[in-house]
Amino acid sequence: MLVKMAMEFVGITGTLIICLSILPQVIKVYKTKSARDLSITYLSGLMTGLILLVIYSFYVGNKIFIFGNVLSLLSVLLLIVLRRKYHRNGLLRLRHQSILTGKESSLCHKPQLYQK
């Protein structure tokens, strides 16, 4: 009985850590209105894995596992929505900043010919 309670606590703690770990990124994207550095490949892979985990969670029937995976899935979905909404903002902000400073950014960089 004690081992089962300890394992439930470990499961709850792990679930909370995983669910809360994405929140700083969501907050940063929302505050800066820029998602330029977010990889859609990573987010898509994470979303796919979480969908599979949610399906498995329902199969196993563990309520903590179901809750944690659904919450994580919703967090990643929110991050994908924010990325779609703000991705262009980051590119425009970078271009505007390069115009103001007079320096071209790597996105606007034209290849230089090598000169001896």
Image (cartoon, rainbow, N blue to C red):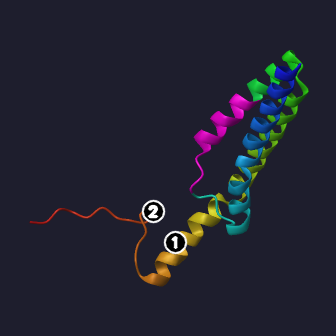
From the viewer's perspective, tell me whether residue 37 is left or right of residue 61. Answer: left
The image shows residue 74 at horizontal and vertical percentages of 81, 42
Which range is magenta?
A: 37-50
Which image quarter holds the C terminus? bottom left
The image shows residue 107 at horizontal and vertical percentages of 45, 62
Q: Tell which residue pokes out farthest to the left in this image.
A: 116
Residue 88 painted magenta? no
The image shows residue 91 at horizontal and vertical percentages of 57, 64
Q: Nearer the viewer, residue 43 or 107?
A: 43
Q: Are marks 1 and 2 in contact (CB under 8 Å)?
A: yes
Q: Tell which residue pokes out farthest to the front in this image.
A: 2
Mark 2 secondary-structure assignment: loop
Residue occupied by mark 1: 95
Residue 49 painted magenta? yes
Q: Amino acid at mark 1?
A: Arg
Q: CA distance from mark 1 to mark 2?
A: 8 Å
Residue at 76 percent of width and 25 percent of height: 53
Q: Earlier in the sequence, mark 1 or mark 2?
A: 1
Q: Main secondary structure of the magenta part?
A: helix
Q: Tell which residue pokes out farthest to the top in this image.
A: 59
The image shows residue 111 at horizontal and vertical percentages of 30, 61
Q: Amino acid at mark 2?
A: Leu
Mark 1 secondary-structure assignment: helix
Residue occupied by mark 2: 107
Residue at 66 percent of width and 36 percent of height: 46
Residue 101 lies, with reference to residue 70, above or below; the image says below
Residue at 87 percent of width and 30 percent of height: 64
From the viewer's perspective, tell me whether residue 115 is left or right of residue 51. Answer: left
Q: Nearer the viewer, residue 71 or 11?
A: 11
From the viewer's perspective, tell me whether residue 41 is left or right of residue 16. Answer: left
Residue at 47 percent of width and 76 percent of height: 98
Q: Nearer the viewer, residue 19 or 33?
A: 19
